[in-house]
Image: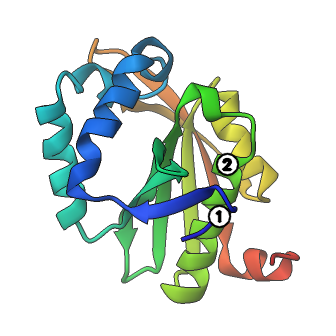
Amino acid sequence: MKITDKISLRPLQVDDANDMYNTIDAQRDYLGQWLPFVVGTTSVAVTQAFVDSAVDADDKTYAIRKGDKFVGLIGFKATDKANRKTEIGYWLSKEHQGRGIMTRAVERLCKYAFEELELNRVQIKCAVGNAPSSNIPKRLGFKFEGIERAGELFPDGSFADIEVYSLLKNEYNSSNRK
């Protein structure tokens, strides 16, 4: 899926593991403050196991690429086809943030979810305090639903509170999207 002339979403592939691991490893402290999986991402082999499971999963996961460079990940998770809803999860390398890349990527997945998958609800969850992440659903017209207290467990045994945002198909259609 083309986002801009330079940015694209490509279905995650088995050969993305090395690039993904190197991206995480290079900014472990930054990403680890918001993403519990970073601590457990200890090798290319561990990353390869995740990639293999994501490639085989029903939920679609995409590598975010700037030209040929891997810069992040976005995808659907916990899709409930019976109730026509899904969640979008994402992360982007620090040096590529603040350029609208993730906002456009999320917008593209919303379009796909509503128009092609015919879902009715898209949800995004962000750790409380992660402004770069929570600004994305706010920018795209998602509604803030509240705080999921102690919603995410970190490897050190601590829990993070999670902001929950949602967008419904009729809200998406009523906006002026391209």
Q: To which residue does mark 1 refer?
A: 3
In the foreground, 10 or 34: 10
- What residue is rendered at 64% in x and 48% in y? 102
Mark 1 neighbour density, 10 Å: few (under 14) some (14–19) many (20 or more) = some
- Give the x, y percent position of residue 163: 60, 39
31 over 96 or under it: above or below: above
- Label ID, residue 22: none
Which part of the image, by quadrant, shows the N terminus? bottom right
**Mark 2 lies on residue:** 101
Name the image quarter holding residue 141: bottom right
Q: Which amino acid is tagged 1?
A: Ile
The one nearer the camera, 108 or 170, is 108
Amino acid type, residue under disc 2 in the picture: Ile
Total count of labels:
2
Corner quadrant of residue 13: bottom left
Q: Residue 58, image x and y in percent?
A: 26, 71
